[in-house]
Amino acid sequence: MPRREKVIRMSVELPLWRALTAYRVLTMLYAIGLFATAYDAFPRPWLAVAYYAVLCGWTLATLPRVANAARCTKRFLAADLTVALAGILLTPLADAPARVQAGGPTLPSIWTAGSVLAFALKGGWRWAALASTLVAVANLAERGSPARDTVHNVILVWVASIAIGYVVEVARASERTLARALEIEAATRERERLARDIHDSVLQVLAMVKRRGDALGGEAAELGRLAGEQEVALRTLVSGGLVPVSRVSEDAAEGAVVRVVDEEPDGAPHDGPVDLRTLLAPYAGAKVSLAEPGAPVPLAPHAARELAAAVGAALDNVRRHAGEHARAWILVEDEPDEVIVTVRDDGPGIPEGRLAQAEGEGRLGVALSIRGRLRDLGGSADLVSVPGQGTEVELKVPKHANDPQDARGRTGSR
């Protein structure tokens, strides 16, 4: 049965844009109605008629502009607010001074709030605060003095617009979180489906080849060993626990869109922490078992790479000195202040005094590749070995490990 990819588009703010569109039309009609009922009280009604003609044409022509955040550009918002402020400042010229001092409505009346709300929906509470402040200044200039009713209306618009802008910011963050959760759920389901298919075919074949190769011996045994390594690697891949998760959940004008975005290639700069598990996952194999917390283990990029390199150096020692049949185990522990990685093997162990002798002979694998790396990060490496019972290397790195290169750069710049 063919599968169809489903793109989910979500937006909790889209209804707010639709409501704003209706609000602008209704408040435009309301402002014109107020003027019509008090037409005879205006000493210069022609000025008001000219303004309302502009207001009506502007409102109707720009309805598509307030359909969503993408179309509501900064240039449009600035022009829209200019229309509202111009109407407020023209009120004393068109209306009677007595009506203005008595608290009569401005020419745009409550239509002005729609312009401020557009700022709130587009840019959040900070944009709303800026727009409402400009409206407040215009209203105070129109009245000439901070009358009680003017201050009351100004504060009301101010608080309401900032509150709506804050709600919009929270809604957008919720959209991103929901889109992320949906993507993880979809990826998990797809991974489970692939795991079932692979388990029913490829993994079973590899397991059978391994068993038959071990039973036959000779060259078949080597083939069985390779099949066993591929089986373990494939199981690790399809399990998905250690596979880097794609960054998705991009914002769109009509809402959050669930879309796959590839991870940065190796060597690309990273601004944020790196999941240590993704660097240790390649070490897992037929003879190396990896146990991790099941949740991301974040570390600074440099610290994560150095710790993974130290683990690799420890595994190299296992392969060189413990024999080709030795097994190794990697245990990752995510503590509140530090990350602990333990590498243990079931080899013959290290005879007492052997490490000091190796350093004296110039073989500094443990001293430099392991301890030296962690010392630069402010961490430590402890090695415990009992002859006949294997070797255990405990690597500790603080969560806020500094990058030695950055530290040298800062020192050199003084």
Image (spheres, rainbow, N blue to C red):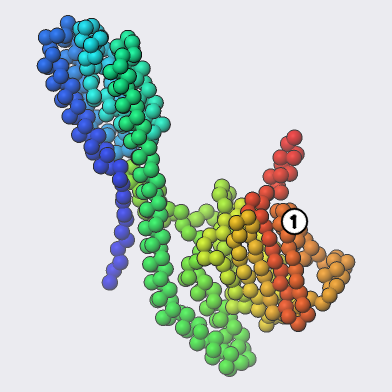
Quadrant of the frame with the C terminus: top right
- At which x and y percent is residue 181? 39, 57
* Residue that lies at the very extreme toward the front in this rendered image: 148
Apparent side of residue 65 relative to residue 227 in the rendered image (left or right): left
Q: Quadrant of residue 191?
A: bottom left
Q: Nearer the viewer, residue 229 or 163?
A: 163
Q: Residue at x 20, y 10 (%)?
A: 99
Apparent side of residue 316 relative to residue 256 in the rendered image (left or right): right
User: Residue flagged by tag 1: what amino acid is it?
Assistant: Arg
Q: Residue at x 32, y 19 (%)?
A: 151
- At which x and y percent is residue 199? 44, 79
Disc 1 crowd, CA 10 A, few/some/many (<14, 14-19, 20+): some
Count of numbered tags: 1
Q: Residue at x 35, y 40 (%)?
A: 168
Q: Which residue is mark 1?
A: 375
- Whether residue 91 can be seen here: yes
For residue 50, above or below residue 124: above
Q: Nearer the viewer, residue 129 or 200?
A: 129
